[in-house]
Image (cartoon, coloured by chain):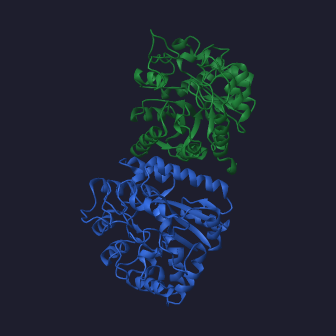
Chain colours: A blue, B green
Amino acid sequence: MNIDGLQYANWSEKIFRQMRKGGLDAIHVTIAYHETFRETVLQIERWNRYFELYPDLIMKGRWASDIKKARDTGRTAIFFGAQNPSPIEDDIGLVEVLHDLGLRFMQLTYNNQSLLATGCYEDEDPGLTRMGREVIAEMNRVGLVVDMSHSADRSTIEAAEVSNRPIAITHANPYDWVPARRNKRDAVLRAVTDRGGMLGFSLYPHHLKGKSDCSRSDFCEMIARTADLYGPENLGIGSDLCQDQPDSVVEWMRVGRWTKKIDYGEGSASAPGFPAMPDWFKDNRDFAALREGLSTTGMSTGEIDGIMGGNWYRFFETEFLAKADL
Amino acid sequence: MNIDGLQYANWSEKIFRQMRKGGLDAIHVTIAYHETFRETVLQIERWNRYFELYPDLIMKGRWASDIKKARDTGRTAIFFGAQNPSPIEDDIGLVEVLHDLGLRFMQLTYNNQSLLATGCYEDEDPGLTRMGREVIAEMNRVGLVVDMSHSADRSTIEAAEVSNRPIAITHANPYDWVPARRNKRDAVLRAVTDRGGMLGFSLYPHHLKGKSDCSRSDFCEMIARTADLYGPENLGIGSDLCQDQPDSVVEWMRVGRWTKKIDYGEGSASAPGFPAMPDWFKDNRDFAALREGLSTTGMSTGEIDGIMGGNWYRFFETEFLAKADL
């Protein structure tokens, strides 16, 4: 079973067909960066149209069981997530509404301070806000997973502690491998994985050692070492594939509507666009090659199966359900 | 089984308890008159809070099977509906989004011309609009029932003809019994019921012979005569109970934001508020008395069971499902 814990492609029939070639059973897709509630609903409408137009390639994912249904019918199940809490605006009631519409992951922050917590690009991290604690409790109640991929350390550790269900970092790598601002320090990874939370390994070049030149064996060795430290059962893939997106999209991700200046995020003035993907992982067809790479690290087939999708599957099985239905 | 095809009460624990006393297994409740999409979502949030606060009395209804679940657990299943297409604004994609959030009925008009069709208070009825035809097809696809309770004759007949699934008039009575503007002429009732559509009998005094003074036997005799004409299997109750609502609410229903003047609708300058309910049907506890009234009309127990809820149940069983799942 192959499950990708995060993608934000410029979706098209071509990409949906590549997902099938790569044997992707499920993907968590981003539907909001800075979108309001209404704008997020427009993204859901866009996906509904894809589901109607390509019923032989993709289907909406709501529950882990939908992944089995997708496998049985040769399709990829699409699970929605938001990289920012902007879709709930300042209204805690929208947590349940969005879960009802299929949202399954929500980051408490995207780089900046939000109403809920602090992003990884702020200078100061005062931890969870009053509303942040309330929203985590509501997310716990309805089965919307707290994702801290773009959050600062203290906020992330507090979220792991305050949440009464496991949380996730859907797409990042260990800071000890590459000290990128988006990668996660040991204390953060411990706080998340000690409580059954998940880390999805990112293939976004800014999170890789050597960036676009990172070799497959380096990446896979890093996974094996991370499994030694935090347990293979808490790990998955979160490729962060942004296939076919124009550079205007990475600008939207970074700048949204919060500044009038250009913020280069993980890029720079001389390299403001999307970085090139490593040549061994360009699109969804390369999941087989990733699995092959992991097989040379000495990890067992069971461990590799878990990292390639089984662990996300087990996590989805419980964490998307309302607390009352557990 | 008792199912009410329409209510818009000032919801409270008291009313939820009265539903249980009246043996209501399911109610279709109005969540929008003139509300935009976002305002409708606020009403859904309000209901979500009721479901959280009163889990022993009510539960959200999505499918007919939820009515069985509600019966088995001693609760009333609440199904959402809109009396106007204002919640979809000018966006056909919101049909599926709202169905996903639990909307199960949508009137194409509320008294006035809408983007989709003509309301029963307009002087001219040019029939379905271009968007109206598109939206009916989309409602048919996802399983959102077309409700023409407040629509004009030609629009209603065209909707029944254009729809490829049965439609409903959730709350009105035959015009031949009381020539109220909201009651339905024979040709309209034929167009709806000939195609398996439903009529829910209204207990709103403006739709009754003698208004608030209408006797139970008059009302029940009218039902029996209507069953002779259109078939008992196409009939149900749609009480239109607006219990505990202040008169400001009936003004909102009639005036919304479409005029700066007062529109008295079915009322008048001398009687602008909610009319008093008949003394034999004041609230949800009176469903047993209504059943008793029907039992004196000569209708069979099976026919009465159908009108009190069985027919709505059968209708819900198919009509709330997406076309693809039928």
User: Can residue A272 be seen by looking at this rendering?
Assistant: yes
Q: Quadrant of the N terminus of chain A?
A: bottom right
Which quadrant holds residue B297? top right
Q: Is residue B228 visible?
A: no
Is residue A61 left or right of A126 when viewed as pictured? right
User: Quadrant of the rendered structure where residue A178 is?
Assistant: bottom left
Q: Is residue B58 left or right of residue B190?
A: left
Above-or-below relation of A119 to B75: below
B121 vs A307, left or right, is right
Q: Position of residue A236 (x, y in %)?
A: 48, 75
Horizontal and vertical percent position of residue A39: 47, 49
Q: Position of residue B102 (x, y in %)?
A: 54, 44
- Residue for point 44% across, 70% down: A171
Total labels: the figure holds 0
| Picture layout, residue A93 above or below residue B225 | below
Task: Give B316 or B94, whichever is nearer the viewer.
Answer: B94
Q: Is residue B83 above or below residue A251?
A: above
Toward the front, the furthest residue is A270
Q: Residue B95 at what x, y percent from top left?
A: 58, 42
Q: Of A183 and B321, which appears nearest the observer?
A: A183
Q: In front here: A286 or B151?
A: A286
Furthest residue toward top? B270
